[in-house]
Image (tube, helix red, strand yellow):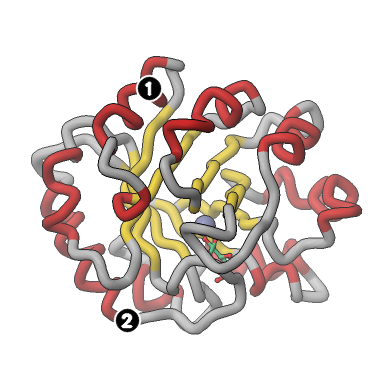
Amino acid sequence: MKLSLSILDFDLSNLNNELEPLYDSIDYIHLDVMDGVFVPNISFGPALIKSLRNKTKVVFDTHLMITEPIRYIEKFVSAGSDIITIHLEATKEIRKTLELIKSHNILAGISIKPNTNVDEILPYLDLVDLVLVMSVEPGFGGQKFMENSIKKLEALRELQLKYNFKISIDGGINLETIKLIKDKTDIFVVGSQVAKADDKIMTIKKLKDA
Ligand code: DX5
Ligand code: ZN
């Protein structure tokens, strides 16, 4: 299982200093982009991602919680994203947006909110490299893990027999909830549990060893 570290709850004014000791322990950096329209919160955009890009070679896993993401794909590619994930609920132009991401030779992901069923992404599984299951309502870090996500992971595991994508889960992962999902996902996103830990490296290690 790979760990994708969400920076949302880190001190953004001191980001590289906070992350530098962690780069060797994590697999991906998870970049939660929010527009205040698709979700009721605004986070950061391509400028912050770009400023971090020359500090580390860690894979940049960009999670776009923005409406009509096709408008900004180029910006997030040139900021240095290695993976760009869009939301099924954010646009009608899913296929076109995924194709645009892939045309830049980076990986494309699709994400579903807690009330969206796996069935709804079936038409796109031939195109995506990653499916991101939201286990909280997107918008904020530090929320409680929603157990209805577990069934979705199981359904996706079966679909992996037929398609070539990785499964990721995002929201409310901690040392307890990780036990519920550890055999059912390829990647997990974690934010507040690490951000608030006194010993961040040890917390990362415990999560990965779970
Ligand atoms: C929620 C974000 C998540 C979240 C992760 O909208 O997509 O990445 O911030 O943070 P925790 O681990 O605190 O739920
Ligand atoms: Zn996220």
- Name the quadrant containing residue 49: top right
Q: Residue at x 62, y 21 (%)?
A: 78
Q: In which quarter of the image is the N terminus?
A: bottom left
Mark 1 packing: few (<14 Cα in 10 Å), some, or many (20+)?
some
Q: Nearer the viewer, mark 2 or mark 1?
A: 1
Mark 2, ligand 1, within 8 Å: the answer is: no
- Residue 21 appears at what percent x and percent y? 83, 50
Q: What element carries label 1?
A: helix
Q: In this view, does 196 lie to the left or right of 40?
A: right
Mark 2 packing: few (<14 Cα in 10 Å), some, or many (20+)?
some
Name the disc covering residue 146, or none: none
- Name the quadrant containing residue 192: bottom right
Which residue matches tag 2? 147
Circle 1: residue type: Leu
Circle 2: residue type: Glu
- Name the quadrant containing residue 68: top left
Nearest the eye: 115 or 170: 115
Q: Is residue 150 left or right of residue 38?
A: left
- Residue 26 appears at what percent x and percent y? 63, 49
Nearest the eye: 153 or 65: 65
Name above or below for residue 94 compared with residue 18.
Answer: above
Which residue matches tag 1? 100
Q: Do the residues labelled 2 and 1 touch (CB within 8 Å)?
A: no
- Residue 99 appears at what percent x and percent y? 31, 24
Name above or below for residue 124 compared with residue 145.
Answer: above
Name above or below for residue 128 compared with residue 33.
Answer: above
